[in-house]
Image (spheres, rainbow, N blue to C red):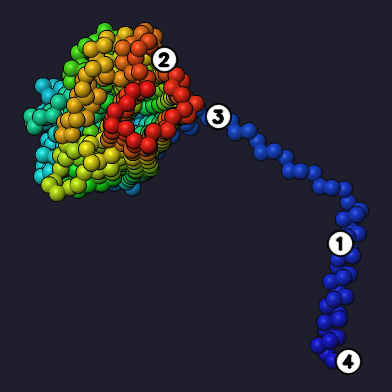
């Protein structure tokens, strides 16, 4: 027999014998017991305290000279702690309980600022020491946007060209005496709580800002940013998200009676147009109560007539006004508006605003237009930019209570430039009403180049919707209800190409039409009250 074959047979027999032996052993044994659970670790407070005191675990600003006594300037100590963490490759700069008076804090990559409970980071006033806040850096394109949008260094906390940064913790940032809401080149003056330019991978979480100056947050050209559970009670803008991508804002409360609460922009501040896109805003509340009364729980309404633009209190969610780059792929959901203006979607500087959804919104004591969609031609930017576009907007599941009767929801394009493809459905709006016949006869000006805000167009001759220069508009499952008789129609449409109203109900006042149509084509009503089903191919003027 071949030697190789004999070797193979012997090997097979050995393996079979071993398998049988092991099987017999397994049958004769009981199942092994499971291993005992690991011992519960004993809490060693001494070891934990030693870890907390260890500078290498994180960088306690007090270890670098911060006093936290609200009198000593802690600017240098805080920046030393940031420098030390940066030299080690990154880390957490820790603010224990205390009152830290400071001028400009220069954030760096791979750094987290952690404000613990009881920690107050206070913007110093210029007269409290030298050198004051960092000066605003030069910007050759600052003529195309407000001063505040053009400079970042003149802030309490600022960072530029950074990555992997965070500001977290349950402490407070206070700018009441040290940050101005205006924009000036005054040496040493600061006007923003937090300013970030061209950064990525950013987390802002859990802290509170009281009076953050011109902006609590100005984020320009920032990508991949998460803002969660932040509370703002401020004297001008809350969050300004400018030329940013992949931004998620959630579970935040913003009270800003004198300017916008959460505002998306796309300015020319970077020296070029950049779109703001891929943004989600969810589970947030915006309001216009008196400054400070949101955080102290009093929710006062005494200063409603002191708004700097001489309009109603602001405090809204808005796109614009700066709109050079445009807005795309954005959702707003599960948000509440209280005692403030309504939702504003604006593009007036050549940008494209498209692919927007808004859903599950409540508005209580709505001080302005519940919905304001505006395509304009202010064109504040380099010459030669064409007029933008506003299209593909879907708004649904909104309840608005106690709407100001001076306003209506507005969808406004311009002659030759329509707002396109707007769907609004599942809406209930309760309007105070009471407008006289004279208001119903008002003519709404075009104002293509004016600042875009509902108050710029004056009181409205309709109590529900005023739609002009638009195409392919659909309103369905909508109810408009008046608290008091009103001499205005529910709807006015001018220069509209394609308008469909399905299951729309509106309070009917005697001798007042529900619809006024002027230069409208392809108009339909289906299951509407009090107007019967109609199809109108074209009309230059009609009342229904």
Q: Earlier in the sequence, mark 1 or mark 4?
A: 4
Q: Residues within 10 Å of mark 4 (few under 14, many from 20)?
A: few
> Which of the numbered marks, if any, corresponds to residue 22?
1
**Circle 4: element type:** loop
In the displayed orientation, state which residue is furthest to the left: 186
Give the Cα separation between the discs numbered 1 and 4: 31 Å
Give the Cα separation between the discs numbered 4 and 2: 106 Å
Relative height, residue 251 to residue 289 (above, below): below
Give the number of the mark in front: 3 or 2: 2
Residue at 84% over, 92% down = 2
Quarter occupied by residue 335? top left
User: Which residue is label 4 attached to?
Assistant: 1
Q: Residues within 10 Å of mark 1 (few under 14, many from 20)?
A: few
Give the Cα separation between the discs numbered 4 and 3: 73 Å
Q: Earlier in the sequence, mark 4 or mark 3?
A: 4
Assign the C terminus to one quadrant of the image. Answer: top left
Estimate the x, y position of residue 517 in percent, counting from the top left.
32, 27
Cβ atoms at labels 1 and 3 below 8 Å apart: no
**Circle 1: element type:** helix
User: Which residue is label 2 attached to?
Assistant: 507
In the displayed orientation, state which residue is furthest to the bottom: 1
Q: Residues within 10 Å of mark 3 (few under 14, many from 20)?
A: few
Q: Residues within 10 Å of mark 2 (few under 14, many from 20)?
A: some
**Circle 2: element type:** loop
Give the number of the mark in front: 1 or 4: 4
Q: Earlier in the sequence, mark 1 or mark 2?
A: 1
Residue at 23% over, 41% down = 416
Relative height, residue 278 to residue 253 (above, below): below
Residue at 88% over, 60% down = 23
User: Which residue is label 3 attached to?
Assistant: 43
Give the Cα separation between the discs numbered 1 and 3: 46 Å
């Amino acid at each position: 027999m071949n030697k190789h074959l004999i070797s193979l047979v012997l090997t097979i027999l050995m393996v079979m014998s071993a398998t049988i032996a092991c099987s017999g052993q397994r049958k004769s044994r009981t199942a092994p017991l499971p291993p005992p659970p690991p011992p519960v670790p004993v809490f060693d407070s001494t070891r934990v305290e030693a870890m907390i005191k260890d500078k290498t675990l994180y960088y306690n600003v007090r270890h670098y000279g911060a006093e936290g006594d609200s009198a000593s300037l802690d600017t240098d100590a805080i920046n030393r702690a940031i420098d030390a963490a940066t030299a080690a490759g990154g880390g957490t700069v820790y603010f224990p309980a205390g009152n830290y008076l400071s001028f400009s804090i220069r954030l760096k990559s791979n750094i987290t600022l952690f404000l613990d409970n009881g920690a107050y980071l206070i913007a110093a006033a210029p007269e409290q020491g030298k050198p004051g806040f960092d000066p605003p850096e030069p910007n050759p394109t600052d003529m195309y946007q407000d001063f505040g949008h053009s400079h970042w260094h003149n802030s309490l906390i600022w960072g530029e060209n950074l990555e992997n940064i965070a500001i977290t913790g349950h402490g407070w940032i206070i700018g009441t005496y040290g940050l101005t809401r205006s924009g000036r080149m005054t040496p040493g003056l600061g006007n923003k709580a937090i300013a970030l330019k061209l950064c990525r991978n950013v987390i802002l979480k859990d802290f509170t800002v009281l009076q953050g100056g011109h902006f609590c947050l100005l984020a320009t050209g920032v990508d991949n940013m998460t803002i969660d559970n932040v509370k703002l009670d401020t004297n001008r803008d809350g969050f300004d998200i400018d030329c940013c991508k992949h931004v998620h804002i959630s579970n935040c409360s913003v009270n800003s009676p004198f300017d916008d609460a959460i505002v998306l922009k796309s300015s020319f501040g970077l020296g070029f147009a950049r779109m703001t896109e891929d943004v989600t805003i969810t589970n947030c509340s915006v309001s216009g109560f008196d400054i400070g009364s949101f955080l102290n729980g009093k929710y006062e309404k005494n200063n409603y007539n002191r708004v700097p633009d001489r309009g109603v209190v602001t405090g809204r969610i808005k796109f614009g006004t700066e709109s050079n780059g445009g807005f795309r792929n954005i959702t707003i959901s599960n948000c509440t508006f209280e005692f403030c203006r309504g939702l504003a979607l604006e593009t007036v500087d050549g940008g494209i605003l498209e692919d927007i959804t808004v859903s599950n919104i409540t508005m209580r004591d709505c001080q302005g237009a519940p919905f304001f969609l505006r395509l304009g031609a202010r064109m504040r930017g380099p010459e030669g930019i064409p007029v933008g576009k506003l299209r593909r907007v879907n708004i649904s599941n909104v309840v608005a209570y106690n709407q100001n009767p001076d306003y209506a929801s507005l969808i406004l394009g311009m002659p030759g430039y329509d707002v396109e493809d707007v769907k609004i459905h599942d809406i209930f709006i309760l309007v105070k009403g009471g407008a006289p016949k004279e208001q119903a006869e008002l003519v709404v000006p075009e104002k293509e180049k004016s600042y875009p805000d509902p108050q710029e167009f004056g009181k409205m001759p309709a109590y529900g919707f005023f739609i002009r220069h638009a195409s392919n508009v659909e309103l369905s499952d909508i109810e408009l209800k008046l608290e008091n008789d009103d001499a205005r129609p529910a709807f006015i449409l001018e220069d509209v190409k394609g308008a469909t109203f399905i299951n729309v109900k509106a309070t009917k006042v005697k001798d007042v039409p529900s619809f006024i149509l002027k230069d409208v084509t392809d108009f339909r009503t289906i299951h509407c009250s009090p107007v019967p089903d109609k199809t109108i191919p074209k009309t230059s003027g009609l009342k229904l």
